[in-house]
Amino acid sequence: MPFIRDAWYVVAWSEEITRTPLQRWVCGEPIALYRTEDGRPVAPADRCAHRAYPLCAGRLVGDNIQCGYHGFEYDCGGVCVRVPGQPRIPPRAVVRSHPRGRAVPLGCGSGWAIRPRPPIRRCPTRTG
């Protein structure tokens, strides 16, 4: 089912977003929501780049979120900053993040809305 991606979606009440990762689905994609130590909401994709394990099932390490499966650790922008047992981080170890979130006033409180990034478009390969 196609979704309108150039639109704002309210994903949670502000008080729901805490230091415990929370999963929400937006436009058919899982999002992990949590707050940094200074209270700023963060919304990375809820799938580890390594084995697609839900990041919300992991834990927070400072402002980073750590996958509960193999321990890959991602910063607020979705970039992997630590891989247990190896000094080199694979350059493709990145998860999509939604940095354009904002607080929105709602009728009976305030919520947090994000504007999903458009899907990555691949150029067709030329043959012949």
Image (spheres, rainbow, N blue to C red):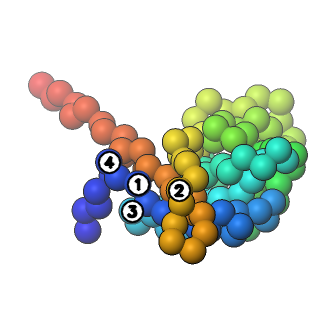
Label 4 and label 1: CA atoms lie apart by 7 Å
Q: Is residue 113 visible?
A: yes
Q: Which of the two discs, 2 and 1, sits closer to the camera?
A: 2
Do tag 2 and tag 3 residues touch (Cβ < 8 Å)? no
Name the residue that disc number 3 marks: 27
Label 4 and label 3: CA atoms lie apart by 11 Å
Identified at 66% across, 63% down, the residue is: 14
Name the residue that disc number 2 marks: 104
Q: Which of the two discs, 3 and 1, sits closer to the camera?
A: 1
Residue lying furthest bottom in this view?
Answer: 108
Q: What secondary structure is marked by label 4?
A: loop
Label 2 and label 1: CA atoms lie apart by 10 Å
Identified at 29% across, 61% down, the residue is: 3
Residue lying furthest front in this view?
Answer: 107
Mark 4 or mark 3: name the one nearer the start of the chain: 4
Identified at 63% across, 41% down, the residue is: 78
Do tag 2 and tag 1 residues touch (Cβ < 8 Å)? yes
Do tag 4 and tag 2 residues touch (Cβ < 8 Å)? no
Mark 2 or mark 1: name the one nearer the start of the chain: 1
Kind of residue indicated by mark 2: Val
**Location of residue 25 in the rendering, given as x and y in whole percent from the top left corner:** 50, 67
Kind of residue indicated by mark 1: Trp
Q: Using the image as rendered, state which of residue 98 and residue 72 is in the foreground.
A: 98
Q: What secondary structure is marked by label 2?
A: strand
**Location of residue 58 in the rendering, given as x and y in whole percent from the top left corner:** 77, 62
Q: What secondary structure is marked by label 1?
A: loop
Name the residue that disc number 4 marks: 6
Q: Using the image as rendered, state which of residue 16 and residue 71 is in the foreground.
A: 16
Label 3 and label 1: CA atoms lie apart by 11 Å
